[in-house]
């Protein structure tokens, strides 16, 4: 037993060594600014603001994640918005919060998830060494770097921790006599853990299916029918969270442009084949692979690859069933079930950029780790196989250690992304925001223009317009804002910018008309209103510009 406890601690230790540099990294200009700097509730945390987070979704509905971010914002060192420096175009030059605690949180939950997985694998395989290597594979595989090193991926590690805990407690409940007090306690706590997982990230809606697969293939089959009744209740619990993705204001426009069922199947098969390759050979990992829905549907080679992979999956399933390899069927099912939310929602906020991302594999890697644990158990009398797999794990750990370096800050991450995918509109947009912060406006315009050419719908028109206003190019700014309003006709920010453009061109009547439209669309939008005031001071006042300016609420280039 001591050996088993020692192995569980080794999982945590080796994982910590791989990700030891993460707490010292800076924020990156992707979702970090959208989730943190632009969140007004984080300026001063109160009970009322915490309740508001739980009542009303900000972007996706994941109130537990935002609550933890809010508490971290309250505890960490921060600067008041009115005291922070801004660029001439009206954006914050620095982040409001100290990043250390925000980086520690996803790492801490990842360590706890790996620790729990070791004990869950031991419970299912009764093989400590296999469980150790399986949990370690889950924890240090290079595709997990994105979930651990990115502040915005706290939702994945947090949801993963509560999800694994929910499954473990549910299995422990069925180790006790039905209807006993202990049984009821474990069922209630596992359901509460499921609820917390759902409140952390929408991907947790797959947990009832994953638990059902484990009960059917790996646990007591005689308990399957009895356990199914409780898992049906879990399924009903996920329904409100499923539909919350459709009602979230940030996703309503995206759902109106979802591909057909046939196209979704093709995109999903392409994603599966892509993920399979990245798990087997995790090279050239990046934040944006450029495999968006449009790209996938227009590539003839993708149709061939997807068809071949479908035949492969089908043949593999038949082979496993024929040989009665229930453990392998369970691992395959867990892996596929973990990706169900991704395929259902087609990645939502990230949809215009890529249909695949490393962080989407977070829970699916549980199936991969469990498969390794069973392989080690099955080949325990063949030390050469165990040695070879151990060497592969060392390679993965080393690869992950060096992969974390790219998450050090925005320039390192985005320049690496451009090395992997030179046509990444996301990368060009993000570098545009970075150079705008540093007031290198020529480079900012260059990258924003590149993003516009590559993906017009995701271009940061409002930021390009603001830069042209600061540079005195009122005619160019007017043209850009007019293009933006063709894509986003209800954008108060773009109406404000168009008003400023007309003011710079000397047409006060048109300026007033556009300001009125902006106010009518968003009368309480304090962020954009103050941004306009800042720009007015920069452009039209002979006085020295004031430093007071809250951060912009909308960054269309952010995820």
Image (cartoon, rainbow, N blue to C red):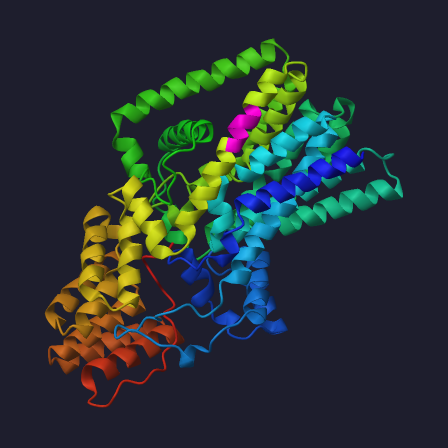
How many badges with numbers are in the image? 0
Is residue 284 in view from this perspective? Answer: yes
Q: Nearer the viewer, residue 230 or 363?
A: 363
Query: Could you tell me residue 556's position as x and y percent?
Result: 32, 59
- In the image, residue 242 sits, relative to residue 55, either above or below, namely above
Residue at the location (28% across, 67% down)?
438
Quadrant of residue 331 within the rendered picture:
top right
Judge by depth and name the residue closer to the eye, 303 or 9: 9
Residue at the image position 42 percent from the left and 56 percent from the top: 31
Residue 376 in percent (x, y) is at: 64, 22
Relative depth, front residue between 246 and 337: 337
Point out the residue furthest to the bottom here: 543
Q: Position of residue 522 (x, y in %)?
A: 36, 72
Q: Is residue 464 magenta?
A: no
Looking at the rendering, in which quadrant would you find the N terminus?
Answer: top right
Q: Is residue 536 left or right of residue 342?
A: left
Task: Give the x, y percent position of residue 134.
Answer: 61, 31
Q: Kindly tell me whether residue 114 is visible in this rendering.
A: no
Figure check: 2 above or below 384: below
Q: Above or below — where is 123 with respect to 494?
A: above
Quadrant where the C terminus is found in the figure:
bottom left
Q: Is residue 255 left or right of residue 188?
A: left
Q: Quadrant of residue 430?
A: bottom left
Q: Main secondary structure of the magenta part?
A: helix
**Which of the pair 424/234 is nearer the observer?**
424
For the record, the magenta segment spans: 389-394
Relative to 251, 455 lies left or right: left
């Amino acid at each position: 037993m001591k050996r088993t406890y020692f192995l569980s601690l080794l999982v945590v230790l080796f994982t910590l060594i791989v990700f030891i540099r993460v707490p010292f990294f800076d924020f990156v200009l992707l979702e970090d600014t959208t989730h943190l700097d632009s969140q007004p509730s984080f300026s001063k945390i109160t009970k009322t603001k915490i309740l508001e987070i739980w009542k009303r979704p900000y972007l996706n509905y994941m109130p537990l994640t935002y609550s933890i971010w809010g508490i971290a914002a309250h505890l960490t060192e921060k600067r008041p918005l009115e005291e922070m420096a801004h660029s001439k175009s009206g954006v914050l030059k620095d982040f409001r919060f100290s990043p250390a605690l925000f980086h520690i949180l996803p790492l801490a939950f990842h360590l706890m998830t790996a620790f729990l997985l070791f004990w869950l694998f031991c419970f299912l395989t009764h093989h400590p060494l296999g469980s150790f290597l399986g949990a370690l594979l889950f924890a240090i595989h290079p595709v997990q770097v994105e979930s651990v090193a990115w502040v915005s991926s706290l939702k994945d590690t947090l949801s993963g921790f509560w999800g694994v805990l929910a499954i473990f407690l549910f299995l422990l409940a069925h180790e006790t006599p039905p209807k006993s007090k202990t049984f009821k306690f474990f069922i209630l706590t596992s359901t509460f853990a499921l609820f917390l997982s759902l409140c952390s990230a929408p991907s947790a809606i797959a947990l009832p299916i994953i638990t059902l697969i484990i009960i059917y293939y790996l646990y007591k089959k005689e308990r399957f029918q009895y356990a199914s009744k409780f898992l049906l209740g879990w399924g009903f619990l996920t329904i409100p969270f499923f539909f919350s993705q459709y009602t979230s204001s940030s996703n309503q426009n995206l759902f109106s442009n979802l591909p057909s069922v046939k196209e979704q199947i093709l995109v999903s098969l392409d994603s599966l084949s892509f993920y399979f390759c990245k798990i087997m050979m995790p090279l050239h990992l990046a934040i944006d692979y450029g495999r968006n829905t449009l790209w996938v549907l227009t590539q003839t080679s993708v149709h061939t690859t997807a068809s071949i992979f479908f035949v492969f999956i089908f043949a593999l399933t038949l082979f496993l069933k024929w040989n009665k390899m229930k453990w392998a069927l369970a691992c395959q099912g867990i892996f596929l079930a973990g990706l169900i939310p991704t395929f259902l929602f087609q990645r939502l906020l990230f949809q215009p950029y890529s249909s695949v991302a490393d962080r989407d594999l977070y829970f699916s890697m549980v199936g991969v780790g469990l498969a390794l644990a069973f392989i080690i158990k099955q080949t325990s009398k063949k030390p050469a196989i165990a040695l070879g797999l151990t060497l592969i794990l060392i390679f993965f750990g080393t690869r992950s250690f060096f992969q974390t370096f790219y998450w050090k800050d925005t320039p390192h991450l985005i320049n690496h992304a451009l090395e992997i995918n030179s046509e990444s509109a996301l990368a060009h947009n993000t570098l545009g925001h970075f150079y705008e912060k540093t007031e290198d406006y020529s480079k900012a315009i260059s990258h924003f223009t590149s993003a516009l050419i590559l993906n017009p719908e995701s271009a940061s028109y409002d930021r390009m317009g603001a830069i042209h206003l600061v540079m005195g190019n009122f005619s160019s700014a007017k043209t850009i804002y007019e293009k933006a309003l063709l894509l986003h006709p209800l954008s108060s920010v773009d109406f404000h910018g168009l008003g400023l453009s007309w003011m710079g061109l000397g047409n006060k009547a048109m300026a007033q008309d556009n300001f009125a439209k902006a106010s009518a669309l968003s009368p309480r939008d304090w962020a954009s209103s103050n941004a306009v005031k800042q720009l007015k001071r920069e452009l039209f006042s002979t006085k020295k510009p004031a430093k007071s300016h809250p951060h912009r609420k909308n960054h269309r280039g952010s995820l």
